[in-house]
Image (cartoon, grey):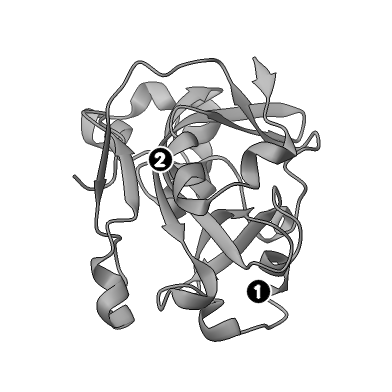
Amino acid sequence: MKKLRRDFYCGDTLSVAQNLLGKTLVHITEGKRLSGKIVETEAYKGITDKAAHSYGGRRTKRTEIMYGPCGFSYVYMIYGMYYCFNIVTQKKGVPEAVLIRAVEPLENLNEISLNRYDKSFSSLNKTQIKNLTNGPGKLCKGLAIGKSENKLDLCGGTLYLVDDNSNDFSIKNAKRIGISYAQEAADYPWRFYIENNIYVSAK
């Protein structure tokens, strides 16, 4: 499998959000390799996107990473308890990113299950398996992505993406989720997902 290079992340954010589907997200933590195939993403178009943290040119300590080079992680907490993992896109100074909404777990399923449910993968029922990593907070918990993984270079050796040329699927798009506050931006069809994959959080 080939690790994605920085130029992959520096393109148009909507294109990157779609091209990320089928790629494998890898996290090396405590000597273990946790991974999952990306099956759902959402694009956030920065300054002109009312749903983006950087809308209107907002620049804070938290969002500063989005103004830097592409190919870095932007991890933030929501509701005071769940982390969300984003990938910075575009050229330096253009604060855009892609939220990874869901992955299909691939490696070390038992470890992912222990992180997520505090129980072994073999003990999970069908519903628990489906809900293992089918949401941004769920995948972060399962793959042990948190505050320490914020601002990491995704071209490094700790948190990165690889391409195994898995592209035998159809891509669907829909409105983004949980952004009703964003006025007209709430209707932008900037959520992309792999059709018929059980780990997609919402159809």
Return the disc, 1 or 2, that comes first in the chain's sequence: 1
Residue shown at the point (23%, 67%) measured from the top left: 187
Q: Which residue is mark 1?
A: 63
Quarter residue 160 falls in? top right
> Quarter holding the C terminus?
top left
Q: Nearer the viewer, residue 90 or 191?
A: 90
Quarter residue 146 falls in? bottom right
* Residue 3, above or below 38: above
Q: Which residue is mark 2?
A: 133
Counting other residues with Cα less than 10 Å from the Cα at mark 1, is it few (<14), some (14-19), or many (20 or more)? some
Q: Which mark is residue 199?
A: none
Q: Secondary structure at mark 2?
A: loop
Q: Amino acid at mark 2?
A: Thr
Quarter residue 93 falls in? bottom right
Q: Nearer the viewer, residue 82 or 122?
A: 82
Residue shown at the point (52%, 28%) measured from the top left: 23
Q: Nearer the viewer, mark 1 or mark 2?
A: 1
Q: Residue 35, percent across and down?
A: 57, 29
